[in-house]
Image: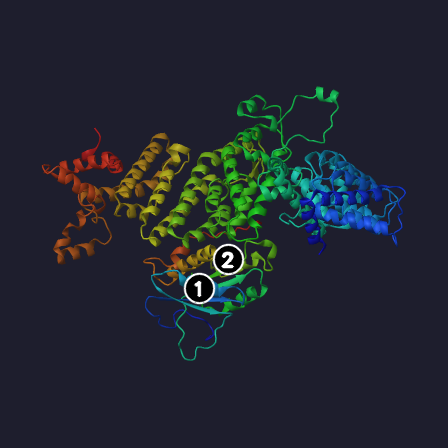
Amino acid sequence: MPLTENDQQKQQASKSGNGKKKTLVALRNAITYFTDARSSAKYRGNLNLHLALENIEQSSRSSGLTPPHILKLVKSITTGKWTEIVSSRLIRSLIPAAHVPHNAVVFAVSSLSAKNISDNMKCLFVRWMVLIYEYVDNKDTLHSLYGILFLFLDSDILCVHICRLLYLMTQRGDVKQYRVRKLLDIQSKVGVQPHIMALLSVYKLYSPNMVTVSSRIGNQSYFKQSDQKWAQIIHLVQEKNKRLNEDEDEAEDANEPSSRALDVHQPRKRRKLDVIPVLETIDRNERVPQSVKSLRKRMVPLEQIENFKQLLQNIDVVVLPNRIASILQSPHLYHVLTLFPDKTIAPRLSYWIHVSLYREIIAYPKSGENPKATALLQVITDFTDHLQESIPVCEWFLNQYLHTWNGLDYRIHILNLITRMPICSFEKMNDLLLEPLRKLYFCSGVYFKCLLLWCFTELLRNLMSVEVPRHRRAVAKQQETNIAESTILLNDTIFGQQTEQISTDNTIVEFINFVDNICVVGLQVEKNNALLMSYVLDFFHVTSGLYSRHGFKFLQLPSSPIVKRALYGNSAVFVSKINELLCRYSDEVNLMKESQAEYVDILKEKIPIMNNYVLCVCNALWQSKAFKNAKFQSTLSAIETYLPSSRRANASFSVLLHPALQMFVKKQQELNQTHSTPRTRELAILNSLKSHDLDGIYTFATTFVGRYARK
Amino acid sequence: MSKLLSTFNKVSAPNTATVLLVGAEGTSKHKLAEAMLNIDTDFNLNMLTASSLPLPKDESDSRPPVNFVVFVIDLSNVLSMTIVESSVKYLDVDYFLGRCCFVVMKAEDPDNQNVEMMAVTGLSDVYQSPMLCGDVKTIRNCQCLARKLLSMVEIAGGFKFGVTPLLIDATRNTFNFEEEL
């Protein structure tokens, strides 16, 4: 139980200054033993050496060593004077109390090329550096050795640990073509190794344009967990010192962890903290001579910009951050992205989104929602909103994820992403997007059905107003340049998407038909649910503007079950809405008629259906012959003969008797007892409905019913 | 022939649906069955579980007719897949008109899968029966899955007025379209 004893010692020491002084003196003496050139390096039977070693081990494990002590010990070890056992014990006890001086690390690195130190010791040194990397006080100095450390990759013994160290150290400026080539050379020699892949994946994260090799995404454990015990001791000592310091000076200590939290050098550590990386632009390692600097254009790193006005003034001289994804943290910075001419931005960003989506959602090991994934999806939705284009990797992600989606996790965010999907052929859209959603639609509750219909409405709106015009422009441009290719490059996008040559009209028509179908069956399943009906009619509200608002050369009418369910239902809102919808469609037809003759075929096909609907509404509401044209006329007349009270069946859906309008009609009749003729009563009711915002019925009457037509 | 499980060879009790869960040991089908029983429904729900098909011969004729069959596949368990593949053959063709479905567990964790997802989708395509992904690890997810199954059972059992599984199936578009994900 050496640790607990030490704890007790420590406690006693803190109580009495004397005890503390004593241990300090003992430690100083022990270290002097190792720094003194005259000390004997003999291991066997050398009591002084053993005492000093034990002393150092004990005090380092209890409270850690101060920077000067670490420096002295590292210097002493690098002389190569001590036997391997002593050296390894010394290296293992190099546990920092608070931080490690950078000089010590530089000495350790220089020892890697020394001849008098065994390979095992070199290896141990690198392992030590990996462990204490987080605590080095000036990482810039260490980082300037990046190139030298990279050379040690050739050593078979050191390679794994050097890779790990470089994995921690790599900054954007370090990613160079010759380094990538070197790594690939090594890989071709020793085969695919996880540590090399790790380093390549970091390189790819910083500049995916340089690393073309495909790494397995989502594999988080590149490195085996070695030196766990050692790391644990270091961590414990740090925690303990932190707690001690907190008692002494709380304010000072509060700065310490936050500065560490903002440390951008550790992708793994940062990933634990936040999805979006921290903004960092300045390449700390870049040492440009003053003369060159003055020649360069004045560049402004993003961190120095404080407000939007400054951003506007400097937008042409902004330096992009090291990790492009950090731009996603602020909507103002999106502008930088859209204005920047650099071609590498899109692949860098795509790669990051791809990796993050995979890691946080698809390969997320626990069931249930991951809060980081929610934040990520939100950011991506905001970003696509700003760009007004979909990101191809999101498409890929949705295609994969929807297949296994349970309809519950991240529901709103996923639906939001779906609404921003680009246009593609209907076959593809159906199989990858609509079919999984259809499955969920029919086995979920009415609330999900409504959400999905909302999602489809927004998707249609987006397709019609953004995606199809973009596609048309691209096609027109391609025809201008006379390139006969099967793919079309969408030029006015950041991500430079390619799409197939498809008939956008066909996709839209088929999509509307699909939604129409699931609406009809959905209404039947949910027994005419009011909420669902409302979403259904909203969808067709958007569809009714296909020609006039979006310039499509066709007309898509809702199928008759939808119209009749709304008309004969018991909600006044839907009666009014369906009236309004039919008016919108009739305007549409009139516009098409006026413009040109090329729509004759479409109109020939659609006008009878349209007329049928209008007639249906007129008969029911205004002519008191709701069932006159119905197929079951004979049945109805049979019923009427035997059941005299059912004579009024035909009139039961007139304005005065419609069950949905009863509330307004009764109220109106109570108010105006004097109105005697049906005509005046109907007029009064129309005005009353209009005053209740149910003006669909009024509009319909003034459009189609002769006696109320506008003069 | 007698080994085939059939829907219509017995008279069912009024307002009752019987669901058969088929899955290997360790596919947590009992947990799923419990979750389904815990949800209030308008009809009486009977749950049967079996580790494979065909079922042993019903000597005393005490077994109710099965309205809906759920196959449970655990992607980390190869045996569960092979059992389902061999069991499906013992279902009468009526079941494939919307009276059976495949439930896939552990679909969200690609690193721990021993069964290819493509194999399961292939199975679901061949038998034209829907495939649901879900898990029973948390109460929320378990209930979500149970509700979905129940809504399918309700339609298959004929408890929804004017809706049949075939009507639902009619809304599906099929294309011979394949693209690598």
Quarter holding residue A610: top left
- Residue A50 lies left or right of residue A287; in this view the side is right
Chain identity of mark 1: B
Q: Which mark is residue A642?
A: none
Residue at 53%, 29% in the rendered image: A332
Q: Where is residue A102 in the image (x, y as percent from the top left)?
A: 75, 36
Which mark identifies residue B34? 1
Taking the spot 36% from the left edge, 30% from the top edge, the residue there is A595
Mark before the other along the chain sequence, 2 or 1? 1
Element carrying mark 1: helix
**In the foreground, B48 or A321:** A321
Depicted A470 relative to depicted A93: above or below = above
Neighbour tally class for label 2: few under 14, some 14-19, many 20 plus, Cα within 10 Å: many
Q: Along the line of sight, which residue is nearer the eye, A683 or A61?
A: A61
Compute the Cα span from label 2 to label 1.
Answer: 14 Å
The picture places residue A279, in percent across and down from the top left corner, at: 61, 33
Q: Nearer the viewer, residue A357 or A108?
A: A108
